[in-house]
Amino acid sequence: MKKYTYILLLPLWIVLYMNLANIADFLVYDLIQLEKGTHLTESLWFFIYEVPKVLLLLVLIVFVVGVIRSWFSAEKTRKALEGKSLFAGNVMASGLGILTPFCSCSAIPLFLGFVEAGIPLGVTFSFLIAAPLINEVALILLAGLFGWKVALIYVFTGLSIAVFAGFILEKLKLQRYVAEWVFQVKSNQPGLAEEKLTFNNRMNAGFDSVKEIVGKIWIYVLIGIAVGAGAHGFVPDDYLAQILGEGSWYAVPLAILFGIPLYSNAAGIIPIVAVLMEKGVTLGTALAFMMSVIGLSLPEIIILKKVLKWQLIVIFIAVVAAGITTVGFIFNLINL
């Protein structure tokens, strides 16, 4: 695409985003002519308003992050972490986990590459925790549905969990619970020359990211917002808060226990969490539930079983769950 195309698309995005409420009003009240205040009307308006809002935010931010990611590669990430001290490595690995386009499907090759490069096991775990837990999809969904304050709180707490969980896992000296064959893997491939990209190459990388990421998750956005819309319109206020024990000590652990067996990405779970909070679930409990669903992904755990023994997987889950529990308790106590 030409440079002028990017310039034209941005004003179009702004006009659409600024008029979403008016469009939803027109469709629900003028075109369909539903009565205001009914459960069905509230649910439908919520769905019609939230779906394009979330998708527009996703398209913009995924594009921007896709352009930024054109300066990164798996090899650059690995080299950046080599030779770093433990805590500094945990912090850097967690930060790189946010910016790099890796998920559960790439867990094993990344794990092997990091171990092969001599990167400490705890630093590797910091990266693997941060990558799925904190990404542009989660950030934009949270900002769109909760506001930037909650979104930034989520990023800060997610980073803290990734850093300290990785640090603790390294201090426990758990290398004996890594599959033996992992340490026997050696790389004999020469380093690849870095490709020089033009402005258009990087812009196209952003559009490719939009097609790949938004193309994969749009259905989860629709499902998540549809569930959230139904709860928004039909579930009585405070009902979900009562189930999750609002104000009770067991609210956060219970939310984590609910979340661990589930599998969803940020696009599917965050709209549901938004409605949980709307119905009275506290911020700490909602964050704990969301982090357990996204950060303790069942598919990733199954994939990692190929390179880790069960003892390490159980310890990994326990340490991350303890971090999530701490975050939930803290934010419930300060009552943001």
Image (cartoon, rainbow, N blue to C red):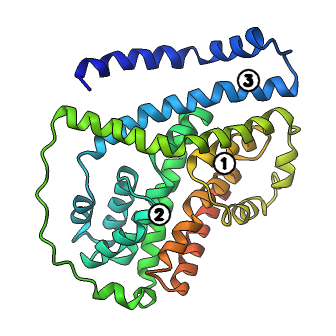
**Image point 82% across, 32% down: which residue?**
233
Instruction: Determine whether, in the image, residue 194 is placed left or right of residue 87.
Output: left
**10 Å neighbourhood of mark 3: few (<14), some, or many (≥20)?**
many
Residue wearing tag 1: 334
Vertical placement of residue 49 versus 228, above or below? above
Residue 59 position by quadrant: top left
Residue wearing tag 3: 45
For the residue labelled by badge 1, is the local secondary structure a helix, a strand or a loop? helix
How far apart marks 1 and 3 lie (CA) works out to 33 Å
Vertical placement of residue 169 versus 22, above or below? below
For the residue labelled by badge 2, is the local secondary structure a helix, a strand or a loop? helix
Instruction: Determine whether, in the image, residue 154 is placed left or right of residue 330.
Output: left
Instruction: Tell me if label 1 and label 3 are in contact, CB under 8 Å.
Output: no
How far apart marks 3 and 2 lie (CA) works out to 35 Å
Instruction: Tell me if label 2 and label 1 are in contact, CB under 8 Å.
Output: no
Foreground mark, 2 or 1, reads 2
**Image point 21% across, 65% down: which residue?**
79
Which amino acid, mark 2? Answer: Ser
Which amino acid, mark 3? Answer: Trp
Residue 43 visible in the snapshot: yes
**Image point 63% across, 14% down: which residue?**
23
Residue wearing tag 2: 104
Residue 136 visible in the snapshot: no
**10 Å neighbourhood of mark 1: few (<14), some, or many (≥20)?**
few
Which amino acid, mark 1? Answer: Ile
For the residue labelled by badge 3, is the local secondary structure a helix, a strand or a loop? helix
Foreground mark, 1 or 3, reads 3
- x, y percent for residue 313: 54, 79
